[in-house]
Every structure is written in structure tokens, then in C-alpha cells.
Amino acid sequence: MLKMVLPKCRELGLDKVLITCDYGNEGSKRTILKNGGIYESTVYEPDEKVDVERYWIHLTD
């Protein structure tokens, strides 16, 4: 699904998108990395009481 939405993001004129996943969710992490995700940081989300990994996917060449 991530791979399918990235072209739409380009059509909307976005230069990059921020994708997140819960820390330890290896399936989501692999999907993000496979689609060009570049790790930015891990932050604590107090409302959900979970660490969240943040990745940027650049949509321009």
C-alpha cells in the first residue's frame, strides 16, 4: 500500500513524506526502508505510551 500511494503524493506536489511506525514493528520498518525511507529519529508518543520511529521518503530525484 505504501508503494502505491507514493506516486499520488508526487502528483499532489509533495517533495517528501514522513512515515512512522511503532518501535519494534519490523514488518513496517522493512516496508518503509524498501520504499526509500531514511531514518530520522525515534520519539516517545505519550498519548499512546509508545516509541515511534520516524522516516522520510524523498519523492524528488
Image: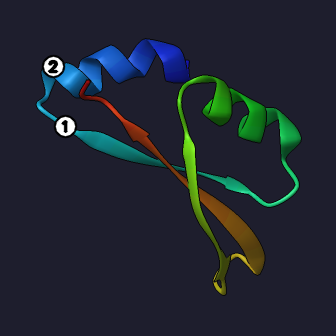
Q: Identify the residue at image location x=36%, y=43%.
A: 17
The reply, left or right, for residue 22 in relation to residue 34 is: right
Q: Amino acid at mark 1?
A: Leu
**In which quadrant of the rendered view does residue 41 lie?**
bottom right
Q: Amino acid at mark 2?
A: Glu
Q: Identify the residue at image location x=74%, y=37%.
A: 28
**In which quadrant of the rendered view does residue 30 lie?**
top right
Spot occupied by residue 60 in the image (x, y as percentages of width and height): 24, 28
Residue receiving disc 1: 14
Spot occupied by residue 8 in the image (x, y as percentages of width and height): 26, 19
Spot occupied by residue 1 in the image (x, y as percentages of width and height): 55, 18
Spot occupied by residue 9 in the image (x, y as percentages of width and height): 26, 27
The foreground one among 14 and 5 is 14
The reply, left or right, for residue 44 in relation to residue 8 is: right
Q: CA distance from mark 1 to mark 2?
A: 7 Å
| The residue positioned farthest toward the front in the image shown | 61
**In which quadrant of the rendered view does residue 54 lie?**
bottom right
Give the structural element (helix, strand or loop) at label 2: helix
| Within-10-Å neighbours for mark 1: few <14, some 14–19, many 20+ | some
Asked if residue 1 is positioned above or below residue 44 in the image, the reply reads above
Residue receiving disc 2: 11
